[in-house]
Image: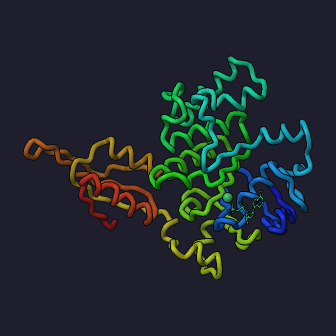
Amino acid sequence: MITLRNISKNYEGVQAVDDISLKIHPNTVHGIMGRSGAGKSTLVRLMSLLECPDNGEVFFNDCRVDNLKGKALRERRRQLGMVFQNFNLFLSRNVFSNVAYPLEIAGVDKRSIQNRVYELLDLVELSSKIEYPINRLSGGQKQRIAIARALAHHPKILFCDEATSALDPQTTLTILQLIKDIQNRMNLTVVMITHQMEVVKEICAFVSIIDNGKVIKNESVQNLFSFPHTGTAHELISPLRYSDVILKKQRLHLVGNTTEDILSRLAKIYHTNVNIVTGSIRSVNNKSVSNFIIELTISEGTLNTIIADLRSQKISIEVLHA
Ligand SMILES: Nc1ncnc2c1ncn2[C@@H]1O[C@H](COP(=O)(O)OP(=O)(O)O)[C@@H](O)[C@H]1O
Ligand SMILES: [Mg+2]
């Protein structure tokens, strides 16, 4: 549990964080959403002990942490992972030594570093790139490496500040999926700072909306989409409909060159089971034409994305109503 009690931070007259009190439950993904300049990054720097608040207190469980100094502070910080929009990787180091870096500075022995780096690269599915220089990786791969590095010391809390804001929508989904997976597997508390409602909708259980350094909404994502809002909350939320977060069983009829690869990619990217209800493959003019009926449990928003995705691969789709 992270508890913030009346914390404030002022920069030369700018009240970046203004008397915020907030609880973040363990083992969840909690979104901090707001426009640019709202105070999100400042808030995360206070929570992650990179800066001290002018007023107020920060607790991890029942332990006050905002006033720690020296060794105690360094040890606390080690239990926190951070991931940023621009990855913050060392361009002069390769993949291995970027992930190894936090372990090296903590004085971990060589053999243990090597084992841990292999484990971490396996987790983010980039073991094959271990010797690569950073500038040969795509944006999504760089973010995977940054996530691996952030997890080096088995943190309890992972802070992601606009971690997907520099990525295209497809890559964003795969990174969110990875974060969700890791959260589940490691019982992590994840704090996702974002200006994108799609991110909140995709993986957060709770969300706090920040505006002008204050919390203006703090609730479950389900509630956020269930009730009408006013002011800033309305502006941020209204472009999306509630149906975008409700998962429903959908039955699709696919005709074209649907391969197993395509179906397993769907399952992976869109974080869903793909059940094949019926399937057959025929050869027409030496081309194989498949005919599949599949079932997926997805939101309406994801359904539309999948339809566009498959149509772009020349597969015709009909949504069947069960
Ligand atoms: N180190 C700093 N020095 C001066 N002003 C700052 C500093 N950090 C943030 N601010 C100001 O505080 C406000 C909130 O910034 P920030 O927390 O970065 O917002 P967000 O992450 O929501 O975009 C902005 O007006 C910003 O200019
Ligand atoms: Mg920011």
Q: Is residue 246 left or right of residue 72?
A: left
Question: Where residue 151 sits: x, y (%)?
Answer: 67, 37
What is the tally of numbered marks visible in this picture? 0
Q: Residue furthest front?
A: 12
Residue 78: image location, x then y, percent: 78, 38
* Residue 174 picture location, percent across and down: 49, 48
Residue at point 62%, 59% (across, down): 194
Residue 24 seen in render: no
Residue at horizontal 19 percent and vertical 45 percent from the top: 281
Give the residue drawn at x 39%, y 49%.
Answer: 266
Ligand 2 sits in which quadrant? bottom right
Q: Quadrant of the C terminus?
A: bottom left
Q: Is residue 54 left or right of residue 266?
A: right
Which image quadrant is residue 69 in? top right
Q: Is residue 248 above or below residue 110?
A: below
Q: Is residue 149 left or right of residue 262?
A: right
Q: Is residue 260 above or below residue 319?
A: above
Q: Is residue 146 above or below residue 239?
A: above
Closer to the camera in the image, 188 or 247 = 188
Q: Position of residue 212 (x, y in %)?
A: 74, 71
What residue do we see at 54% from left, 58% from top? 202
Q: Quadrant of residue 220?
A: bottom right
The picture quadrant where one finds residue 143 is top right
